[in-house]
Structures are given as structure tokens and as C-alpha cells.
Amino acid sequence: MRRVLLLQTMGGQRKSYQDAAVRQGVDLLAYELPATSLTENAVASVVGFAKSNVVTGCVAADARAAAVGAAVTAALALPGHPAGAAGIARNKLLTRERLRDSDLLVPWFFPTSIGANTGALASMVAFPCVVKPLFSSNGRGVTRADDAPSFVHAFERLREQLASVDADADDGEHDTALVEGYVDGWEFVLVGVMHHGALHAFALIDKPDPLEGPRFEDTLYVVPSLAPEAMQWDILDAVSRAAAAIGLRHGPVHAECRVGDRGVYVLGVAAAPLDAAWAKALRLQTDAKSAPIAYEDVLLRHALGESPADWRREREASGVMKISAAGGYIYSRGQSPEVVERELRERAVVESQHG
């Protein structure tokens, strides 16, 4: 029986996996996790659900679900990311510490209480710096500060966010902020899977818009990357080392990187797939003559035991642009990354003119 459990914190990922399951002949069981804290009993309930439904594979659609997915795969003796590694990958402070201890490039950083005196903190830090929540936030609350007033404003804004009633973090995640040095450079996303401890990269994605702050919300992804080949190999090596340092073993990963004057900074390695809206432009094939299939199709096949070794990104260039805060996206495919980027920017102008 080909039955995969899909774990997610929010339901936005479900349709892309349901469509993939139909194409692959997979029985998909979607389980939406609560937005409040995940107790041991709640995790045990998910594990019991997986056992009673004879699940043969598990995909965690987001970083928060990855910790639960690790408990499920461990209980069912299936390959997966270790629970400890999934927790480290989601925690920006623990990730920084692991990468630093593995001699990978990291900015200076320190954690601080969200209730700290902002004026006193502002007198201690070097500028520019970045203030961010400790746990995954989809870019919310991540702000660059270039001086003391902007630092105070950024920190107080983060404090308000973490205190809001709709904050989706677990117990204890509201208490700490991370302050770190700003890394100047171009940003990339490396998407792939860990397969029994080895990283198999599917694509290196360019973010052509310079993300210099004060906010760092993604707007544009284009693939294949136009980075020099030597830089691409450096990114792959750094992400592979970072994933090993965190302890990730088996399942989807995607890494955010910045390349500056000193080299590659791995900002984080999520133990989860790329968000469905961004991944829609990513298709894979086994060779130049085979029909491309969606990213989610490959993830389901990998969850059921298939090796990712033969899968490569399609030859055609592709891209996606976010055009509204409400979650509007446009997609394009073309002969080259430059053509795709130009078309997306032109279409974005048209979309803005027509509301």
C-alpha cells in the first residue's frame, strides 16, 4: 500500500500534494497540526494516527511540522530526519551555534530576552545588524537596523508581533529574539533532499532582487542560477556541511544562503520542502526526453523509498514572483533566466496597473 501522511501547520500546501498524489497513485492522508503548542500528547496522537492507518511514508510540509514528522518516522521505523536535528534546523540560534562550531561562516550573533531594555541593547550592538525571531517566521519580524533609533523600532515591532494573539509559535518561542550582524551579498535558495545522510540538490535558485532591508520578504525566484559555476559549487559544499552539522539525514531540505566578500553564509537549512507557491515553478525529470513532473511528485516518491539520484531540474528556465501581500503569485517559463525575469517584471507592472 502506497500511503503517505502529509503533516502541515497551515492548509495552504495541501492541494499541491493532493494533486501530486493523484498523479502518482498515492493514498495521501493530510493531517493539520494545531497552531497552538504541540504537547507530547498531541504528538503521540499523530503517531497513533499514522500507525493505525498503516502509513508507509511521511512528508512534513513546513518546518514546524518537521519535528512531528521526525517522531512519526522514528515510531514507524521509516527513514527520516532525527527529531533533534529537525528542532535545531527550526531554531535560528541553535543553527548558528552548530554552523559556527563546524567552522562555517556565520555573522556575529547573540540571543536576548524579548523584554530587554532596547536602549541599552542599541548601545551594545554594531551596525548594520538584523533583529529576528528565534523560530521560523516566513520573514515576519526580520528587520535590518542601521542605527540606534531603527534598532529600537525594529525590536519593539518584533516584541509586538511575538505578543500578538495570532502568533503561531509554540510555548516559550515568544521569549527570545536573535540579534546578528548584517551580511551584505546576493541571496540564493538551494532546494533538494537528504537521502540517508547525503545531500541531493535539485536546484539553486537566484533571488534577483537585492534583499538589503529593512524588510527581507522574498519577491522573485528565478532558476537556473546565473551564479558562476565555482560559486555554485561553494554554495553546494557549504549547504552540505551545514546540513551535516545540524544532523539532517533523510527528507526534504531547502537552504537560504548569502554570498558575501568572505564567502558563503548559510542562513538556515529547513528540514522541510520549499513552500508550494514558490515550488510551483520547479519541475524535475530523469533525462532530457522524459516529461517533467512537479516537485511534490518527487517528494512523495522519495517518501516512499525512491532514490533521488536520477532526478534533475528541467532544462527550461522558470521563475515565480510574489505580487501581493495577500499571496498573489505569477509564474513564467522560458529559454533563459534573463527572459523569465524580464517577463515576470513586465507582467507584475501590468498586474499592478489593473489592481
Image: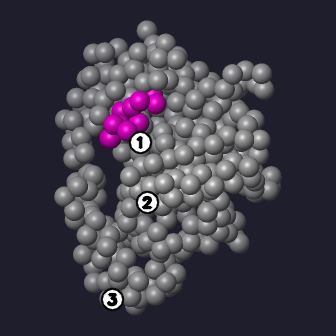
Q: Which residue is mark 1?
A: 62
Residue in the image at 19% along x and 35% along y: 41
In the image as oriented, which residue stretches furthest toward the top?
Answer: 1
In the image as oriented, which residue stretches furthest toward the front?
Answer: 354
Q: Which residue is mark 3?
A: 120
Q: CA distance from mark 3 to mark 1?
A: 36 Å
Residue 83 makes an appearance in the image: no
Q: Nearer the viewer, mark 3 or mark 2?
A: 2
| Depth order, front residue of 8/246 | 8
Q: Nearer the viewer, mark 3 or mark 1?
A: 1
Up/down of 284 relative to 93, above or below: above
Residue range corresponding to the magenta coloring: 7-17
Which percent across, then down, holds residue 59? 44, 30
Image quadrant assignment for residue 163 = bottom left
What is the total number of numbered labels drawn onto the structure image?
3
In terms of sequence position, does the residue under pointer 3 or pointer 2 come before the other? 3
Q: Given the image, on which type of amino acid does mark 3 rest?
A: Ala
Q: Nearer the viewer, mark 1 or mark 2?
A: 2
